Image: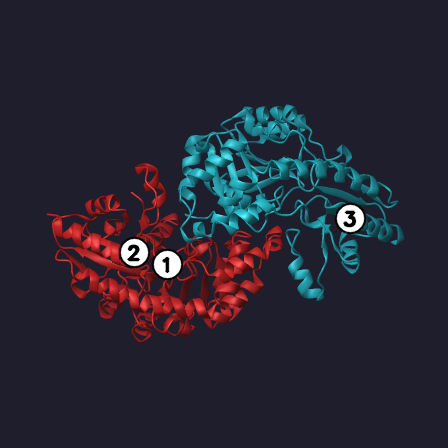
Chain colours: A cyan, B red
Amino acid sequence: MDLHGGNIYRIARERGVKDLLDYSANINPLGISEKLKERVANSWELFERYPDPHYIELRETLGKHSGVKKENIVVGNGATEVIFLYCKTVNPKKALIVMPTFAEYERALNTVGCQVDHFKLLESEDFKIDVDRLREELKKDYDLLIMCNPNNPTGKFIKLERMREVVAAARESNTKLMVDEAFIEFVEGDYTESVATLEEEHVFVVRALTKFFAIPGVRLGFGICNDMELLERIEAHREPWTVNTLAEISAKVLLEDEEYIERSKRWIESEKEYMYSGLSEGHKIKPYKTETNFILVKLLGGITAGELRDRMIDEGVVIRDASNFPFLGDKFIRLAVKGRETNSQVIERIVRVTNEAR
Amino acid sequence: MDLHGGNIYRIARERGVKDLLDYSANINPLGISEKLKERVANSWELFERYPDPHYIELRETLGKHSGVKKENIVVGNGATEVIFLYCKTVNPKKALIVMPTFAEYERALNTVGCQVDHFKLLESEDFKIDVDRLREELKKDYDLLIMCNPNNPTGKFIKLERMREVVAAARESNTKLMVDEAFIEFVEGDYTESVATLEEEHVFVVRALTKFFAIPGVRLGFGICNDMELLERIEAHREPWTVNTLAEISAKVLLEDEEYIERSKRWIESEKEYMYSGLSEGHKIKPYKTETNFILVKLLGGITAGELRDRMIDEGVVIRDASNFPFLGDKFIRLAVKGRETNSQVIERIVRVTNEAR
């Protein structure tokens, strides 16, 4: 089973089909900014040199747009490298992950031999976080707490006001906190709602341009850290030149592309509502309200997520079977929020197939 | 001090200059293939998806051109990732590196706490390898032998006939062998001279498209391995999606670009001779014969490599001070072999400056 969505290559290979609608990966459907394409066409000479091993300009750009100094930024080959680097450097003995969530946190912790416990978000609580319960749990001597906000796959966002309590609970229990904000650009208020604004030494924030700017093939992630001693140790663990030149150029061009950013925000605002209400029409499915560009859906009938995924491939759509997110069981799927035309097709097909299923 | 050449960014920042001739990095001066630029302009939609996490097509392409099966290929974010992955997975307790050479092997071994010894190539032997002496040294219970062939910074290549003896010596002493062939495309006979053709289980070959195809900003390296059990363990250590989409496209386009490959081979053949004979005119320098696209030069007068490097920046040229290659001392520089026009300028300036120095 694949750990992640987006592997439509294997599906296409195995089934011998092409032109599948990929609703398994959470990418901005506006696609790559035209400004980036133009800039690359005029900047090929930059690829003929090694990237700056200290990534000074890149870190300045990322810092400026995140409201932090370049000294507080560590860059990586996608958020994945940043997550692995952080876990390798902190080298926790015992960590707590808020679940269900993205699988790579646990994989990164496993590579350093860390004991991993899970703090479960409950379906009965609409997958919202209970800070009091978390505070109690943190008394059990954890070195590190990891969470994703907004959370993948639930689509729920904990606003800064609430996150202050989580940050305080971690501080009081002497626990480091890593927050993956890979989807924060989709949230109303975006960076002003980030825990990075709190500038706390025990908090490490992970970001990526991947999702919002539709560049998963480019590979650019970064971390924001206020613990300078830790940052130095992270840099010592980093292999040289892991961030490629296209990623450097992308940061510079995309973060300045106000028109793209505005269009994307308007799109997500309208389409997430459109999909939620369209899916709500289904008799045997329950969509969850989302603050991001993907939507969690519970299957209320007899069909499992795996069965629906197979049926939907016959319908030309790849959805994400969310049953490999631990604690979700086999009744949840995750859908990307994309453009209106395909959204309406996908809603129609899912509602029809689930209505007709047992 | 920088561990590597090519950091002209810092020099430009610190000195406030631009338009330096970069003779410190070993990149094909033909620059990036036009075919690659065209292909990227027509393939942006590929960047809007995650790369295939198993890199099936990429490994097929690399395997086909290296004469090995895709199952024997592991890909990485530049040769650097492959080197670090291999060292992490093999996890040797005691390793021997043939020196002087590229600094990252030792850095990779240091990250896994390996004891590192050095097998010194001698100036008195023209930096050629003495296999009998190596065979003796290998009796000291090494887990791993690392060498670069052709070797950076000496420019010397050990032909396959001779490498068979090295491979046999390693096998007899139960030592794994990692050979970095990042510059092999510049050598006459190229892949037919590779140790990968021997298909030995204890040999791991590192390759990169970086140097020959002038794409250091793209980041693509790979390893060739016949030990399938080891390869599986390497894959388990690999973080997902470390190879970006531009790297995937590059392999496909560049390895098929016969015209570029032919032009590059003709260029290197003529320019390496031109530079060798031009530099031989200097009274106070001694160039070494090279089989690659860089040339090691010994300073015979009173000036040190560091002093010459500083003087040459005033002349508008960045050279590589080779004194941070252990065992070379402070009297060696390394020059890239580039296009005729700048080669003749650089030769003239170096010969003049060293002739005039104390």
Residue placed under numbered mark 3 in the picture = A341
Which mark lies nearer to you, 1 or 2? 2
Q: Check disc 2: other Cα within 10 Å, few if <14, some if 14-19, many if 20+.
A: some
For label 3, the SS is helix
- Is any part of residue B168 visible from this angle? yes
Badge 3 amino acid: Glu
* Residue with the most extreme left position: B358
A131 w.r.t. B7: above or below:
above
Q: Quadrant of residue A106?
A: top right
In the rendered structure, the answer to whether residue B220 lies left or right of residue A102 reads: left
The subunit carrying tag 1 is B
Badge 1 amino acid: Pro
Which mark lies nearer to you, 2 or 3? 2
Residue under the point 66% across and 44% down: A28
Residue placed under numbered mark 2 in the picture = B342
Q: Are marks 1 and 3 in contact (CB under 8 Å)?
A: no
Residue B335 lies, in percent from the top left, at 27, 56
Q: Which numbered marker is on residue B29? A: 1
For label 2, the SS is helix
In the rendered structure, the answer to whether residue B257 lies left or right of residue B323 reads: right
In the rendered structure, the answer to whether residue B289 lies left or right of residue B25 reads: left
Number of labelled discs?
3
Badge 2 amino acid: Thr
